Image (tube, coloured by chain):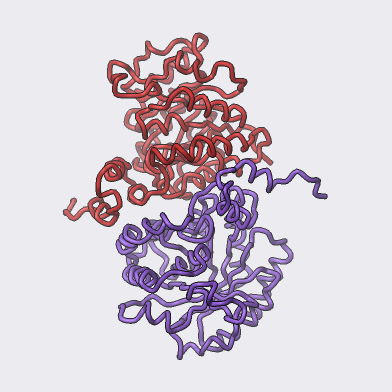
Chain colours: A red, B purple
Amino acid sequence: MYREQIKILDCTIRDGGLINNHDFDHRFVRAVYKALSAANVDYMEIGYKNSRRLFSPKDYGIWKFCDDEDIKKVIDGIESKTKISVMVDVDRVDVDDVKPRKESVVDMIRVACYVKDVDKAIRLVNHFADKGYETTVNLMAISRILETELNECFHQLAEECKANVIYVVDSNGALYQETTEYLIKKAKSICKGKEIGIHAHNNQQLAFSNTIEAIIHNANYLDGTVFGMGRAAGNCPLELLFGFLKNPKFDIRPILDLISTEFIPLREKIEWGYIIPYAITGMLDEHPRAAMALRDSDKKENYREFYESLIGSDEVE
Amino acid sequence: MYREQIKILDCTIRDGGLINNHDFDHRFVRAVYKALSAANVDYMEIGYKNSRRLFSPKDYGIWKFCDDEDIKKVIDGIESKTKISVMVDVDRVDVDDVKPRKESVVDMIRVACYVKDVDKAIRLVNHFADKGYETTVNLMAISRILETELNECFHQLAEECKANVIYVVDSNGALYQETTEYLIKKAKSICKGKEIGIHAHNNQQLAFSNTIEAIIHNANYLDGTVFGMGRAAGNCPLELLFGFLKNPKFDIRPILDLISTEFIPLREKIEWGYIIPYAITGMLDEHPRAAMALRDSDKKENYREFYESLIGSDEVE
């Protein structure tokens, strides 16, 4: 009953790193890698490959840079078929920092971009593909793109880009199942021969159902995170995906242990999940940054005032 | 763009009462009624109408019995178009406790039953309908019913029952959008002329998306609860429904205030929401009672052991 082509990519450390400036210690990341390996998750995304010229290591944890030496400390000695992925943002990476794949412990590089930056993304992806990596393009904030621009973007990716996978990324957590269906079908119909992926945010408690919707319409690359950890409301919970997918290779039990021992205590220290200001930005299709600022302030539970500040009182025309 | 026939029923106090033995004080319930009225929610379900011969008032709060005098203390003096609903379980109600509608403050009586008890439910519903009430039948645990029994049940309801609305109730939080679509379409096609409703539980973070799925397939009666409060994982969050529905009569702001002032403090005292043992019973399509017992024990975070206890180690044939 299961679809063998489906791959799960866990981006707990990468997306979760957006909560704590990528400052997880080696022990914690190793525990995650060990559990994902035992659970047979296909990929683990461990962080960003950012330029040290643009971001100071004094201000960020090591997973903002993902040096091979740090990755080795996490994976060495653990039996695993789980591949390692890192993410890059356009304009934030030094391509010379990226060694050829055969000299690296990284298997996949995912390039995140807004639709307007797709030309930059294609250039990066093709560079990394030529260095031997599996590659993806992750189209962010896809809920707010004009039809004509989105069509052109997908056509460019189909014709000019070496990426194996094109991801629909619901950065705002604003998609519903009908809009997810629409976007996945469009990507699939234009980007023939490529795999389609889904990265959902959970502002409206729809990350899991939108991922299911994408599966129904033949997306095969699915992002999840342990206990849904990720920026703001977080992502599609990996453990729920396991419950839905029928592939006997996946084992939920190491993930259950990991949540008990590591993520329940972590949730006491850093915040993600169903939190009303994130639900509000999701339903208004806004980036969560205003809600994140609210949660850092002494007005964190002033939901009505926050809602009214977003819908505005000024004439806008 | 909105469908005028859609009605929202808030069952915060009724389903939330399953967490605390229906022991909310008048002040709290009045605050909920006031906010629901200001938000223009169509119905508020305030509790159960249970027999005092079967349940002692010493063991339960007042919303296990829903005397008119208690309801009046909550609603008197508040301007409102929100109708009042109470729920009854088959075999747990004294029909003589229920006055004719014109002598009561209650507008709607919902009869909850398992499919096997549909004959009892029909008898009760027809009795209450004859007393002048709006009525519904709420078919519990509908994820675990054989096709042939479900067909017979829907045909009986279509032909013998005076209920205005037939509810699909996902007691276990086990439905996905495809199974929701299947059940709603079946109910709609057999119970012609009746409205179909959905009551979803949120074990797998699918209560909201399953409610949307039911809307897509023409269910018009939607259950929600404030901040998703309800037994175990809780229900479809009312505030998210507001974000999805386009009907301009609904106002989310009183609900946001209510969550800020009442439900954030309450959540510190009683537990509901996305909690792994409830997710596990949802994905295994089991009643949450074993998970509720676990959460009351000193093994509340032992997820793996709990999972293994449910999938079992014995031969079952």
B107 vs A215, nearest the viewer:
B107
Tell me residue B63's x, y (percent).
Answer: 48, 74
The residue at the point 51 percent across, 34 percent down is: A196
Task: Name above or below for residue B76 compared with residue B35.
Answer: below
The residue at the point 45 percent across, 14 percent down is: A68
The residue at the point 48 percent across, 55 percent down is: B271
Q: Quadrant of residue A62?
A: top left
Tell me residue A49's x, y (percent).
Answer: 39, 20
A3 vs A73, nearest the viewer:
A73
Task: Name above or below for residue A45 compared with residue B193.
Answer: above
- The answer to whether residue B142 is seen in the rendering is yes
Task: Name above or below for residue B37 compared with residue A204.
Answer: below
Left or right of B77 in this view: B146:
right
Tell me residue B93's x, y (percent).
Answer: 60, 80
Residue lying at the far right of the rendered structure = B317
A204 vs A182, nearest the viewer:
A204
Quadrant where the image shows the N terminus of chain B: bottom left
